[in-house]
Image: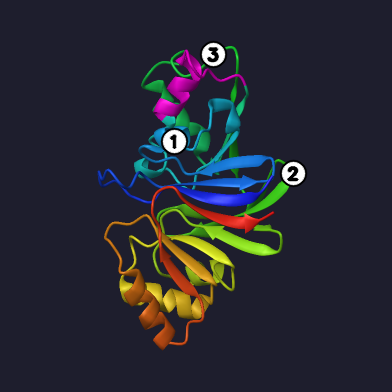
Amino acid sequence: MSNRIVLLGTGTCQLQPHRMGSSVLVELGDTRLVFDFGRGITHRLVEQGLEQDDVEHIVLSHFHPDHLSDLIPYLHAAAWSQIDPRNKDLHIYGPVGLEVQLMRLLSLFGPSTMSRDAFDVHLHEIHDDHFTLAGRRFGFVDLPPADNHGLSFTVDGKAVVLTGDSSFHEQEVACLQDVDLAVIDSGHLEDHELLELAVRSRAAVIVCSHLYRELDEDELNAQASARGYAGRFIVGQDLMPFDLGA
């Protein structure tokens, strides 16, 4: 199987038909995970032709609604859908507080609404700066100020970083240092901060996601090139894929 990521959602809390909430699908061989699960992502997964049992792992960067709200319809469908009921266990990973936060969320609907005997939901709180999923090591990088975490991994010699919410700061620069592909929260950064991040991190490709405002890709690249940046900016769109090699 190939290795790739797909931008399932490049938006924010804003209600836009062309941008769902924040989410990235990661496919690494026979391991598939979804990083963040914002508004509309359940529908995006269906658009990708994925059924319930095709997704066994979900990783949450933090607990803001625009990064996890679609867990409700996803789990509801897992339990009660007559066309695609879930039969495999689901593993959800996230920062410390994951169990308390999700139990609060799910308790609004009653314990039986989101569960069935056919599968279990396992919650995994990540206490360190890394964790292991399906035998593969992932970095789980603290990116203030929103108690947010980035996800990092290496595949076929390529370093990849995904961020949830983030602002411009030294931790962000360090997280993106010399990586091959970075999908970043650009909604909380001004253009000059995006340029500074590119120049200082030297990331080869920076994909702008979590967009509160539309960005001019050509202008960003022109300004970055003028400052000596040898990489490339891409303004992300929902369902945009990136091949990571065979």
Q: Label 3 is placed on what type of residue?
A: Arg
Vertical comparison of 200 with 91: above or below: below
Q: Could you tell me the amino acid type at mark 2?
A: Gly
Image coords of residue 237 (percent x, y): 38, 54
Q: Residue 115 colored magenta? A: no
What residue is pinned by disc 1? 47
**Label 3 vs 2, first from the N-terminus:** 3
Magenta run includes residue 77: yes
Left or right placement of residue 213 versus residue 196 in this view? left
**Quarter occupied by the N terminus:** top right
Check the picture and name the quadrant holding the C terminus: bottom right
Q: Is residue 203 visible?
A: yes
Q: What residue span does the magenta drawing correspond to? A: 72-87
Describe the element under mark 1 as helix, strand or loop. Answer: helix
Residue at image point 29% right, 46% down: 13
Q: Residues within 10 Å of mark 1 (few under 14, many from 20)?
A: few
Q: Which mark is residue 135?
A: 2
* Badge 3 element: loop
Q: Residue beneath label 3, please? A: 116
Q: Is residue 109 left or right of residue 203?
A: left
**In the depicted view, which residue is nearer to us: 23 or 200?**
23
